[in-house]
Amino acid sequence: MINVGVIGVGSIGKHHARIFSNLEGVRLVGIVDADFPRAEEFAQKYNCKAFKDHLKIIDSVDAVSIAVPTTFHFQVAMDFLGHNKNILVEKPITSTLEEAETLTSEAEKRNLILQVGHLERFNAGVSMISGMVDKPQFIESQRLSPFLGRGIDVDVTLDLMIHDIDIILSLVKSEITDIRATGARVLTENIDVAHAWIEFENGCIAEAVTSRIANEKVRQLKVFQHNLFMNLDYQKQELTCYTKLDDSVGKEIKKTEEKEPLKEQLVSFIECVKNGTQPLVSGHEGKEALKIALKISGLVNHNLKI
């Protein structure tokens, strides 16, 4: 039995608690939140203990998922690693590259699991398209959301675009040679709309468009390669493929078995803890995605000052 805790039960953390409470071979022993009445609410719902201070739960757990605001990721994660606990930390891994490097090094030194919550890697559609990508020439991603008023403590590049950056890096597997970006601050003090252009050493080009003030929610990934165009709808977990035939174009819609990506992610995390295996998205992948997201933010902010 793996004893786990959830640190932070906001919009994402509450679902971590829900899923852990129902996983076989897992005991949810406690929920931590700075808003103690909220911690108590979910602890009562899932029959575990409530805490206001994450240090109070350290001795009771084997592993934790950390879903506090990004600015607190580093300190909370280091506290658990320092007590030899395995951790899953929500994306982005930390606020700075220096913090990400320290966190990754500490986990490796102690031979602990450090998984980063890049949820889309566990989308069944992503798993399908990953097995079909071969020498991509152009990749286009769109991640648009209506304004919800959460996640606005960071740029939209760190809140939303970082998902697509991670997916693109996992598909292309080549060094980046150039990045261009533009964007705008509209409803918050941080970047709300961003458009990035990424060029790779192998010739592939990726375009990522992200907004948190759109009319509707859109989650799409388009991959263009020789004789094949793939269009993935993340929300439907549906892949549409257009293939060049001798004298025509064939169209095929591949529908995956719909699964909850967050549940798949947490199941994978527990398996890594049990078996001591490396997670699909380790601290290294989390750090690389953060590096590119920060670079894009820097370019957008620089352009906004001109």
Image (cartoon, rainbow, N blue to C red):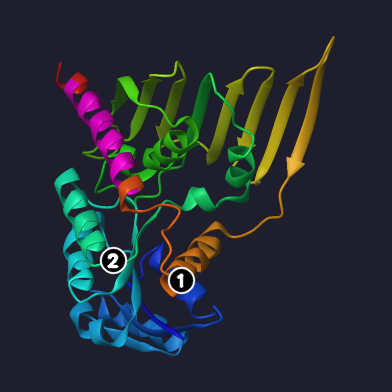
Q: Which residue is mark 1?
A: 275
Amino acid type, mark 1: Asn
Decide whether the magenta segment is chiefly helix, strand or loop. helix
Picture coordinates of residue 58 (x, y %)? 24, 82
Queried whether the magenta region covers residue 287, the answer comes back as yes
Query: Please, is residue 200 above or below residue 64 in the view?
Result: above
Say few, some or many: other residues with alpha carbon within 10 Å of mark 2 (under 14 / 14 to 19 / 20 or more). Answer: few
Quadrant for the C terminus in the image? top left
Picture coordinates of residue 288 (x, y %)? 31, 40
Q: Residue at x 68, y 42 (%)?
A: 238
Q: Mark 2: which secondary structure?
A: loop
- Figure quadrant of residue 223: top right
Please give left or right for residue 3 compared with residue 50 in the image: right
Query: Please, is residue 262 above or below residue 223 in the view?
Result: below
- Figure quadrant of residue 210: top left
Of the numbered discs in the image, which one, if any, rests on residue 111? 2
What residue range appears in magenta?
286-302
Q: Residue at x 79, y 26 (%)?
A: 251
Picture coordinates of residue 203 (x, y %)? 45, 15
Q: Residue at x 40, y 36 (%)?
A: 165
Q: Residue at x 41, y 81 (%)?
A: 42
Amino acid type, mark 2: Asn
